């Protein structure tokens, strides 16, 4: 508890002391969850960076310091697993492979596919940068509103508003381009 208060005050030695006491537990936990030593090392560092930046937000009433740290590590591991799972499901197809794909039987279908992508990009261009970032974070990482807010370091209300307004803009843009999509 005293170390976290010192970290919140900007004491790097306190962070080092807390790291020395807990990093093995965090690393072992992450390595078991992820089954990947390199990712576990990376997320251990990310976790302690979060401890550094969020120390002032630690609430002793919510539980012990180690539990708070492990919860941050767990959250990062879940994000990584979701990201990796999503990446496996939507592995990008090389441009050359796309032209040889079985689902594009003719030049006309290929042209139609390109036109649909262009129409979809035009719809996405109606979004502000904040709306697009919030929607992409929620969709591609499969995160809830609170998780998106934490990930983007933005207030929950702002994230909800951006996602809702962005989705409404997309609905309107898609309905206007309905023949092209």
Image (spheres, rainbow, N blue to C red):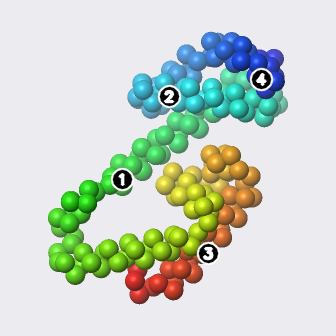
The CA distance from mark 2 to mark 1 is: 23 Å
* Mark toward the start of the polypeptide (3 vs 2): 2
Question: Which label sits in the foreground, 2 or 1?
Answer: 2
The residue where tag 2 is placed is: 42
The residue where tag 1 is placed is: 89
Dividing the picture into quadrants, the one containing residue 134 is bottom right
The CA distance from mark 3 to mark 2 is: 37 Å
* Crowding near the residue tagged with mark 3, few <14, some 14–19, many ≥20 C-alpha atoms within 10 Å: few
The residue where tag 3 is placed is: 168
Question: Which label sits in the foreground, 4 or 3?
Answer: 4
Tell me the element at label 3: helix
The residue at 40%/74% (across/down) is 118
The CA distance from mark 4 to mark 3 is: 43 Å
* Crowding near the residue tagged with mark 2, few <14, some 14–19, many ≥20 C-alpha atoms within 10 Å: few
Q: Is residue 1 visible?
A: no
Which of the labelled discs sits on residue 10, or is there none?
4
Up-down relation of residue 87 to residue 60 (above or below): below
* Mark toward the start of the polypeptide (2 vs 1): 2
Q: Is residue 43 left or right of residue 57?
A: left
- C-beta proximity under 8 Å, tags 3 and 1: no
* Mark toward the start of the polypeptide (4 vs 1): 4
The CA distance from mark 2 to mark 4 is: 23 Å
x and y, in percent, of residue 10 in the image: 77, 23
């Amino acid at each position: 508890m005293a170390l976290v208060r010192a970290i919140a005050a900007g004491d790097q030695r306190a962070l080092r002391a807390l790291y020395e006491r807990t990093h093995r537990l965090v690393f072992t936990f992450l390595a078991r969850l992820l089954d990947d030593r390199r990712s576990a090392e990376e997320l251990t560092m990310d976790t302690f960076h979060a401890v550094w930046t969020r120390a002032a937000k630690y609430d002793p009433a919510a539980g012990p310091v180690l539990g708070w740290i492990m919860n941050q590590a767990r959250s990062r591991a879940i994000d990584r697993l979701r990201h990796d799972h999503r990446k496996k499901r939507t592995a990008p197809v090389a441009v050359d492979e796309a032209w040889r794909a079985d689902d594009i039987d003719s030049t006309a279908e290929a042209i139609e596919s390109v036109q649909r992508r262009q129409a979809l990009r035009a719809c996405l261009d109606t979004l502000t940068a904040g709306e697009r970032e919030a929607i992409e974070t929620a969709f591609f990482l499969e995160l809830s509103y609170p998780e998106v807010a934490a990930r983007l370091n933005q207030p929950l209300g702002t994230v909800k508003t951006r996602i809702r307004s962005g989705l409404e803009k997309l609905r309107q843009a898609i309905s206007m381009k309905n023949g092209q999509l």
